[in-house]
Image (cartoon, helix red, strand yellow):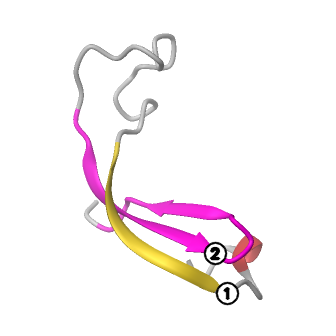
Amino acid sequence: MLSMEEVYGKTIKDISLCYYFDPIEQDYLKEYKNPKKGKANPAWRVLFDDGYKVIIDNYNR
């Protein structure tokens, strides 16, 4: 997150573990609302005090 300029100066309100399904990585661009199967990876959801959210899912790649 240190390289993400859009979060500079923001205050973190919450960090929680979640599961993230990336439709691009799973090749579901045309049917992203109705995937038949796929792999959800553990990720971190970071919520800032202004409501902005960041999902960090690339720590295991």
Q: Is residue 22 visible?
A: yes
Front one among 23 and 33? 33
Q: CA distance from mark 1 to mark 2?
A: 6 Å
Write the residue at 22% across / 20% down: 37
Q: Which mark is drawn over residue 48?
A: 2
> Disc 2 marks which amino acid?
Phe
Q: Position of residue 22 (x, y in %)?
A: 41, 38
Write the residue at 49% across / 78% down: 14
Front one among 21 and 12? 12
Write the residue at 63% across / 78% down: 3
Write the residue at 32% across / 58% down: 18
Front one among 36 and 11? 11
| SS assignment at label 1 | loop
> Disc 1 marks which amino acid?
Thr
- The residue at which mark 1 appears reads as 11
Please provide the residue range marked out in magenta. 39-59
